[in-house]
């Protein structure tokens, strides 16, 4: 029953009752007796009857009925690959994403949501509309805090832990307005989740790009060190050179052993000053000189460069190991960048509408009879407490 119908109902019954009151003495007597009961006790009338009557008449004749549209939403985490049954399989892992239902709940009730709705659907103009009774509408002079308080009093967001969803409701003076406001809230909730997702992906992408840049600089620096080292030491691959020198040294040492053996054999049947012995001794001396030269190349001074080849090899191997590490870091950074690019394209989270905003066919507020009866019981209890306290005081006074 809407307000106009209710007013017609009240007017019709009032006229019928007035006619009955004028023509029926019994009704006149009953009404007089009832009024004496209700208003004969002034305290009872002031504390209970009049407030309840005023409240009832205000809600029945003045208060603008409000419709309430409801919807159910949830956050789906597309990045989760875990296969879980039930509702969780549809929604993904709500706690593993960047935005959880608690964050979304707080956002819906925040000043940011109110400002976004004001910009998008001019929500405050709807709340200030003259279609709403003077006592219930938002004042045009309301500050930001009062605007937010009014907004949060007209919407409700409840978290359902079992389904990991949010039950959202919004009030309006018509059923279409309530649905319109709620749809605006859901749209802004989707924008919020998408925005958080985009910001995180953008930060990760920028971080990955920075890591690639640093890895590339490190790799270039290491390669430059290797080139400078090779140029400064006039050597391309010291390890290969060391292996060559070691092979030559081994060959010379083997030749020296053979030559010394031959010298011993010659000395068995020839004099020490014979030409054959002297020639063999010169050969041995030459081999020893070559061996010493090779040792100097490996362990000692090489051509006046004051560089030990084994030390050069160790230094070069250290630089080459650093280069390998730099290559590995660069490869990993490139892989991370490609992954960040893929994540930036993919929508990791989204708001899923489990129940679209409803179009209510009956106003939810005011709950006239329930609220009136509740107020009557509360005031009656207060009245009883006051009467009891007065009785106790009077008994102690006398």
Image (cartoon, grey):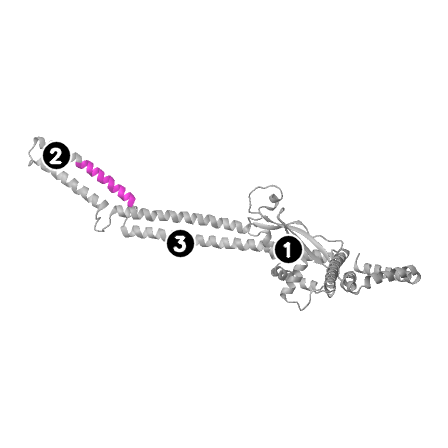
Q: How much space separates mark 1 and mark 3, taking CA atoms?
A: 45 Å
Q: How much space separates mark 2 and mark 3, taking CA atoms?
A: 62 Å
Residue 122 makes an appearance in the image: no
Callout 1: SS: helix
Whichever of callouts 2 and 3 sits on the residue coming sooner in the sequence is 3
Percent across and percent down for residue 310 are: 26, 45
**Quarter of the figure that contains the N terminus:** bottom right
Callout 3: SS: helix
Q: Is residue 375 left or right of residue 26?
A: left
Percent across and percent down for residue 307 are: 24, 50
Percent across and percent down for residue 124 are: 67, 63
Q: Is 393 rendered above or below residue 198?
A: below
Callout 2: SS: helix
The residue lying at 18 percent from left, 43 percent from top is 292
The residue pinned by badge 1 equals 187
Instruction: Say which mark, if any, is on residue 263.
Output: 2
Magenta residue span: 238-256
Q: Is residue 234 left or right of residue 333?
A: left
Furthest-top residue in this view: 269
The residue lying at 58 percent from left, 51 percent from top is 100
Furthest-bottom residue in this view: 141
The residue pinned by badge 3 equals 217
The residue lying at 23 percent from left, 45 percent from top is 298
Whichever of callouts 1 and 3 sits on the residue coming sooner in the sequence is 1
Percent across and percent down for residue 232 are: 28, 52
């Amino acid at each position: 029953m809407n307000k106009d119908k209710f007013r017609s109902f009240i007017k019709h019954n009032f006229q019928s009752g007035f006619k009955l009151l004028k023509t029926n003495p019994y009704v006149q007597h009953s009404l007089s007796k009832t009024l004496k009961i209700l208003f004969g006790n002034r305290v009872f009338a002031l504390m209970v009857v009049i407030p309840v009557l005023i409240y009832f008449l205000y809600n029945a004749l003045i208060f603008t009925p409000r419709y309430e549209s409801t919807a159910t939403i949830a956050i789906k985490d597309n990045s989760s690959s875990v296969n879980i049954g039930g509702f969780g399989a549809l929604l993904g892992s709500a706690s593993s994403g960047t935005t959880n239902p608690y964050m979304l709940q707080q956002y819906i009730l925040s000043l940011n949501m109110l400002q976004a709705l004001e910009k998008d659907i001019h929500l405050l103009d709807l709340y200030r509309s003259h279609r709403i009774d003077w006592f219930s509408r938002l004042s045009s002079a309301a500050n930001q805090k009062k605007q937010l308080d009014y907004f949060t009093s007209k919407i409700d967001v409840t978290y359902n832990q079992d389904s990991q969803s949010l039950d959202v409701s919004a009030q309006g003076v018509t059923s279409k307005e309530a649905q319109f406001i709620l749809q605006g809230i859901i749209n802004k909730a989707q924008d919020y989740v998408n925005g958080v997702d985009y910001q995180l992906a953008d930060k990760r992408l920028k971080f990955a790009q920075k890591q690639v840049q640093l890895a590339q600089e490190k790799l270039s620096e290491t390669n430059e060190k290797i080139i400078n080292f090779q140029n400064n030491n006039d050597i391309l691959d010291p390890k290969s050179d060391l292996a060559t020198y070691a092979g030559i040294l081994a060959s010379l040492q083997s030749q020296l052993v053979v030559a010394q053996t031959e010298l011993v054999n010659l000395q068995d049947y020839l004099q020490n000053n014979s030409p054959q012995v002297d020639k063999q001794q010169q050969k041995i001396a030459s081999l020893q000189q070559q061996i010493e030269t090779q040792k100097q190349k490996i362990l000692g001074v090489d051509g006046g460069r004051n560089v030990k080849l084994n030390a050069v090899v160790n230094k070069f191997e250290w630089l080459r190991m650093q280069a390998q590490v730099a290559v590995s870091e660069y490869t990993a950074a490139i892989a991370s960048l490609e992954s960040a690019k893929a994540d930036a394209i993919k929508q990791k989270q989204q708001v899923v509408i489990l129940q679209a905003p409803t179009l209510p066919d009956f106003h939810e507020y005011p709950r006239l009879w329930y609220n009136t009866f509740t107020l009557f019981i509360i005031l009656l209890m207060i009245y009883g407490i006051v009467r009891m306290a007065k009785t106790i005081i009077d008994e102690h006074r006398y």
